[in-house]
Amino acid sequence: MKRALMLMATLVLAGAWWATRSIPPQPPIPALAEEGRFLICPGGHTGGGFTTRLAVASSVPGPFSIGLLGAQVDRAVAEIPAAGGAVTDLSELGDVGLSPALVEIPTAEAGAATVAASGASLQAVGCVAAPGETLLLPGGTTRTGEHFSVVLANPFAAEAVVRVESSSEVGVDNSPELDAVVVHPGGFTEVDLSRVLSSRDSLNVRLIPVLGRVAAVARQTGGMDVAGWEAVTGRAELFLPLPGLRIGRLSLAHSAGIEVSFSIDHFDEDGEAVGVIEGTIPATGHLDLSLDDLITRLAGLRISASEPIAATVVFDDGPVRAAGAAAPRLSRRWLLPGAGGTNSVELLILNPSDLATQVVISGLVDGARAFSVEILPQGMAAVSGRGLPAEGALVVADGEVAVAWTASFENTLAYQLGVPIDG
Amino acid sequence: VSVAVLVIEGEDPRPTLDALARQVYGPISVVLIAAGDGTGGEHPNVAEMTSVKELADGLDPAVPYVWILHGDVRPRPDALASLVDELERNDASVAGSKILIEGAPDHLESVGGATDVFGEPYAGLDPDEVDLEQYDVVRDVAYVSGVSMLVRRDLLRGLRGIDTRLAPDAAGLDFSQRARISGGRVVVVPSSEVFHRGGCERGVAPWFELAGRMRAMFKAYQPITLLWVIPFGFLVGLIEGIGQVAMGRWRILPRHLAAAVWNIWFLPSTIAARRGLRVVRQVADEELFRYQVSGSVRLRELGSEWAERVTSALDEDNAGAAGRFLRLWTRPGALAGLVAGATTLVAARTIWLDRTPAVGMALPFAKSASSTLAAYAGGWNPASLGSPEPMRAAVGAAALVEMLIGGRPGAAQALIGLAGVTAGIFGMAAFVRRLGVVSPWRHLAGLVYMGGYSMQALSGNGHWPAMIAGGAVPVALAAAMTPWPARGRGRLGRLAAIALPAGLAVVFLPAVVAVILVTGAALVLAGTGVSYMGKLAAGVGIGLGLLGPSVLLWPVWAAEGTHPAVTQPWWWLVGLASGVLVVVTLKGGVTGLGGVGGMMAFGGLLLSDGPFLGNEAAQAARLVVALGEGLLVAAMISVASKAGGFSRRMLVMVPVLILSVPLLTWVTSGRVGLPPDAWSRRLEFTRVLAPGSESDRVLLLGPEGDLPGTWRRFGGGSYRLLTAGGPTFDQAWLPTPQQGDDALAQAISEISRATTVRPGALLAPFAIRWVVVLAGENVFEEAFARQVDLAPRPVDPEFRVYENLAALPRGLGDDGSVWVWDGKGFEGRPGSGRVRLAESASPGWEPNWRQEDWAGSVSAAAGVARYRPDPKLAGAAIGSLVLLVLLACTLVWGRRR
């Protein structure tokens, strides 16, 4: 019996070995694509006399794609060259009016912005991710002669529902109509606040995602010009390089539900911190400060608050409308997609540190102009972007700075913050 | 003597009072209880009171006895005198009369009687039995009829009279039991004759009598008795109810239910009555058991009735067969087997009435048995992204059964399941019988084996194949323990009888080979199985031949799946307590058996719950524990049946009861311990919402234990892939990861990191059209909130379902044509180009296969793509089938005389 058992065990083992070796060897697995990211550009606008350039900038060359939301058009695939910038005319993809776009790009070190122009208006709006948190959009107005709307873009496959809350000069100023704004998958919707909440001098909007997530921009139209700015999440410290324009307002907002104290440090081109303004934002949500009370000439602001806040600067000088959000942080490297293509481009660089900073500015195409400037400690500088390409510019500093840019022609102005691409 | 005449509604008590007036032993006083209508006024010395208790409390202490008499009786003139004489002579506390039916004076109604442990009266009288003085002897009984009983006054006072909430019969039983545990004797005095008109029974619903008997039981028994009487009573009621339904009497089950509800409603007063009884209790429940019949009266009657029906169904020519059949029924072992079989049917009712729940590894069989068999016999294994690796032998066996019964997958699965469970129960009973446990209660060992803690740890995790394997194990062991036949032919038959169940067990759980051999070895160590070990090993060896292609190739010791570990730590305490009791109580010939059981239970528990074993080996260890549990119960039953004293017997039964506790959930769930159905028709939406895409795949993401079959892991969780339509048994086991599986794992990891906005595009090459996220899976929340090509579809309230907008078909021609998976391969439009098959790369595909990334493509020229079966595996599968048939034939041939 023992012999029989041993024989059986041997046969079983031999059979296992024989059968196992008949499985073919496995070839290596090809690696998948590297990590990627996406940007939503709610500020796109094609047709109706508008021409929108979508500028995409990246420190990593490679392909990217652009798709228009709400339009039955194919995605366009383009290439970021080694120099780092690419421009696409959105009207080439579709002539569809408001046309938020989705940019898919295989790197996190990238930024994009739309620059929309018509005969009498110019507007630059950055492209953003959709963080899924409460977004703040201070700085609007629906007073007579002004039109204020919010574009909600949902490029995702799931439906999004957003509660739109607002505050105005009268305090909390919600409309039941905006309790649940539905944004369909792969689409967008424009909320006309001039109709729903008309005749408000100062309007702050809070976007609370109920389902899904969205990206949003505000569109303020007055005179002939259009201003656009992105909705952002709050930060406890913000930086705002400003041009010398003094007609307009700085709007501060929060969603804390309590009074929020803040202080504003003021830097000018002489390299001196010229003063501190302190105050509180009411619990109802927002506070407008006149630029005329804040600055006298080219200046940069550092805004600190006891709770996360958002800050938007709005210029409304006669027919001119321009606006932009404050920078959430400082950085040594900034991409300025779309900052170029005209001689009126001006780069605004704020150096709040105690050391002078050397800044190198270069265009994002091969052979483009490159130059350097020095920014004084606690200083602010406006640098002409003459000769920079429409793709935009890369700003590299040896200290941490905040960078924005303006462009203008005739009675129009565009203001846009750069994209910080490292810590 | 004072007489308490209980006035019966609608009955005139005057005849009773007149008869009392004629008693030769004149009572001191007569009291009408709950009269209030002045009927006693016509008789001198007749008072009225509201309760017997009031009478007992108010009686002169010089009056020693109270005769409690219903108002619808006519006692003979010497009835009281006989009662008093016999009560005093026998030093009893309660004496009951012989009750005859008024109008039919020779017909007996009651001469006292026994009950079973559940309180069911057993008078031993046939219906319309004539009084031929055959019971005329004074004797101790469990109860006397409450129609006429003489009670000691002090006892009546101590027991607070009759329970007025109860129906008449139940009240008599209740009072008799209380009298007995108060230390009194209860006797019946047949010379005291009372004619009963039966008015007290009119209008009393049967359920009310049943409820009263239950209350009497709850009041009288000590807690330790109630601990096992209540669950077993429930089980008996359930079996009786179902048995009666089968005979067309549907009212029994509701009757039990109503009785239970009534008792729950009056539970506070029952508890209060128990408290009152505690003060006067003199003896333990053992004193009650002395006057009880063994087993269940109701089940016995049910069995008799069934037997009667079967007998009447047979014609006179078959009287011999009927006689044999009846004799079989009257054997205690057969009756116990009947109970075990009925219990199994009840425990598996969902399976045979509806379907086997689709959960864990208990997945519905595929609709095409032939395709599954072809895949098993060296064909393409379609699980996950496909594999040349052979399917599990269990899949082949299941497909074979399905084919044999005409291609009905649900019936085949139910058949295998029921056969497995039944084989386990009766196999275990036969196994322990071979080991010397001859008590009919050995079937309880079988029930504990298949429905106890350990087997439920397997079935509760959906380990259906392990359950089936477990069912076959004791059958093989029992066959091995049967005395070795003298002739060669018989020996061959016996070898086949070992090999066949052993082989089938190993087919369903390969690791079970160790269980059989470990059990055999343990019995050898205990000195109980030395002579059988060689035959067992030989039989198992032959049975291994059934495994065919799969077991030799499968990494059976480390396959992924739900680990059958025990999650409730108190089970350990239960086991420990049982072990201690084993050591304390086991003596004599069954010591070895108990020792083996304990050793297997604890050793198996250590192995299965420890970190040493992979999933399937742990399942096998669980089966060792289950066998240990069964052997322990068998040993205990053997000891109990031979134990001398009642206390010792009860002590021995404690671990049996503890090990039997899980049977309650096993029976009541109706799924033989399997979890509730989780997957039947759950993924039907994949067919409905995307017709024509039935062969595309579904990616399930969720917690490990909630996924059907086995699964794979990625960094943050677990997943598995299915063909659209739902999980099937042929996909239950995922094969060893192939190139495609590795690529898919990478893609899922990338999606989980939320670094892509197009997860659908990443999943498209794998032909994944649907992504289903189960509750509890949160890794993908961010990723699926920020993506553009997985559209949410609100089709299931518990799952998050996404349709892949970028999905590609499983077979895609380079001219855009779709090639459809037909269970054996792909079919599509012939062309000059190539067809990409979303199957893991394998050169077995034809025609003209070429590798593309992790997958491959074939020429579209033939309009068909097939996988070339592995001839070795095909041969092995056919060999297995031949061996199976040979074994079955040998078994039959070897048993023929």
Image (spheres, rainbow, N blue to C red):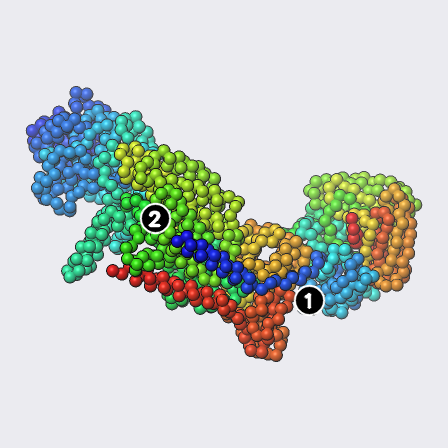
Q: Nearer the viewer, residue A315 or B318?
A: B318
Kindly report which numbered mark, 1 or 2, lies closer to the viewer in this rendering.
Answer: 2
In which image quadrant can residue B43 be found? top left
Is label 2 in a helix, a strand or a loop? helix
Q: Is residue B278 above or below residue B894?
A: above
Q: Which residue is located at x 47 percent, y 62 percent? A: B549
Provide residue B387's location: percent of width, then percent of height: 55, 63
Secondary structure beneath label 1: loop
Q: Chain of mark 1?
A: A
Is B332 or A239 nearer to us in this picture? B332
Relative to B158, is B535 above or below? Answer: below
Give me the C-alpha separation between circle 1 and circle 2: 83 Å
Q: Position of residue B65 (x, y in %)?
A: 16, 26
**Three-letter amino acid code at disc 1?**
Ala
Q: Position of residue B795 (x, y in %)?
A: 53, 59
> Which residue is found at the position 44% from the left and 47% from the top?
B622
Q: Measured from the top left, where is residue B411 in percent x and y?
A: 38, 62
Q: Is residue B602 visible?
A: yes
Residue at point 44%, 57% (across, down):
A8
Disc 2 chain ID: B
Checking the image for residue B531, the label placed there is: 2
Front-lying residue, B512 or A179: B512
For the point 71% across and 48% down, the residue is A167
Task: Specify the quadrant that holds the N terminus of chain B.
Answer: top left
Of A334 and A341, the residue lying toward us = A334
Residue found at the far front of this picture: A3
Report crowding for label 2: few under 14, some 14 to 19, many 20 or more residues within 10 A (C-alpha): some
Count of numbered circles in the view = 2
Which quarter of the rendering shows the C terminus of chain B? bottom left
Which numbered circle lies on residue B564? none
Q: Amino acid at mark 2?
A: Ser
Q: Which mark is residue A71?
A: 1
